Amino acid sequence: MQTSEITIQDIADHARVSKSTVSRVLNNSCAVHQDKRSAVLEAMKSLGYEPNVFARSLAGGRSMTIGILTQNIGAPFYDSIAQGVIEGLAGSGYSPIFVDGQWQKSTESEVIRTLLGRKVDGLVLIGGEVPVEELNQLRERLPTIVVGRELVGWENQCIYIDNVDAGYRATMHLIDFGHRDIALLRGIKNHADAIQRFEGYTKALADSGIEFDPDLIYQGDFSAQSGVLGVNSLLSRSTHFSAVFAANDMVAFGARLALHRQGIRVPEDVSIIGFDDQAEAAYMTPPLTTMRQPAVEMGAAAASALLHRIRGESYQLPKLPVQLQRRESVARLR
């Protein structure tokens, strides 16, 4: 018998229960005795019945889908958050729909409208540049959780890390190892994460009595190519540096390659510290010291929080720490 031909009556007859019992099991709307529930589920399995989730969800006023706005699909950090969202939705009956904002406000607004047109039941927005005014209007329409941005008035609706503190601790780790000429390969100029990590960097220098040197700053982005270009720029200007604080691990990978091409050893000649602790960081040569950002945990927490908001349940977003992951790319100066 084909799934499309199977009716509730067929299941009821096979399980020897009423149609209303089958309906209650399908909709999970109220308690059903375990013996009858098992009989219905076994009948569905024997008949090869697959419930039409889309039709049932529409009848219930929900699409059972969650819209996920991410940035740069394929970028390890954002993909890790997305993986966490998938894990957080597992077993909930909700399916994710992913769109890519590409770090462009106009693109983000367009793909969010696309998600709204698909009648998603909630939104998880990962990073992005959408103004808070627009986000305030958006959350009035449907439950929304933001990941990776600290927004005023969005307490318990956004999950983020303390980038100032993380940037401070990364820089202090290098200073504690005797480094004073620390190059900073910055991320995207107007990106909040890059701005805050720069603030942590300058604060660590000031607290350590080290004068800020603008020649040690390279304004790049979050790509590996930026790491290559940053190191090449510093070397072409004969800028002396004993350590590099990279905007993220991708930038650190590029910086490592550029130093290798110039015959500069890591960490014997120049130390490197990254940010994120993506999976490949442990397999760089040498393994990369980095600040571990809990990306998967952030995504899972965001998904869980959104499900609670959809159901009208209380919840509390966790405060997730950034941890220094010590490996072999930072050496102590003699």
Image: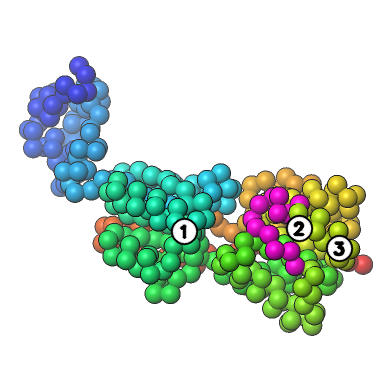
Spatial CA span between label 2 and label 3: 11 Å
Q: Is residue 110 above or below residue 27?
A: below
Q: Nearer the viewer, mark 2 or mark 3?
A: 3
Residue stretch rendered in magenta on the structure: 217-228
Task: Answer with left or right where residue 114 lies relative to residue 101.
Answer: left
**x%, y% of residue 294?**
56, 57
Q: Is residue 10 above or below residue 137?
A: above
Q: Earlier in the sequence, mark 1 or mark 2?
A: 1
Dot 2: element: helix
Dot 3: element: loop
Residue 95 on the magenta span:
no
**x%, y% of residue 251?**
70, 54
Q: Residue at x 52, y 55 (%)?
A: 103
Q: Earlier in the sequence, mark 1 or mark 3?
A: 1
Q: Which mark is residue 230?
A: 2
Spatial CA span between label 1 and label 3: 35 Å
Q: Residue at x 16, y 23 (%)?
A: 6
* Residue on which disc 3 sits: 237
The quarter holding residue 330 reads bottom right
Question: How packed is label 2: few (under 14 Cα within 10 Å), some, or many (20 or more)?
Answer: many
Q: Nearer the viewer, mark 1 or mark 2?
A: 1
* Residue on which disc 1 sits: 105
**Amino acid type, mark 2:** Gly
Task: Answer with left or right where residue 123 lies relative to residue 169.
Answer: left
Q: Is residue 63 visible?
A: yes
Please count the marks in the image.
3
Question: How packed is label 1: few (under 14 Cα within 10 Å), some, or many (20 or more)?
Answer: few
Q: Is residue 64 above or below residue 6?
A: below
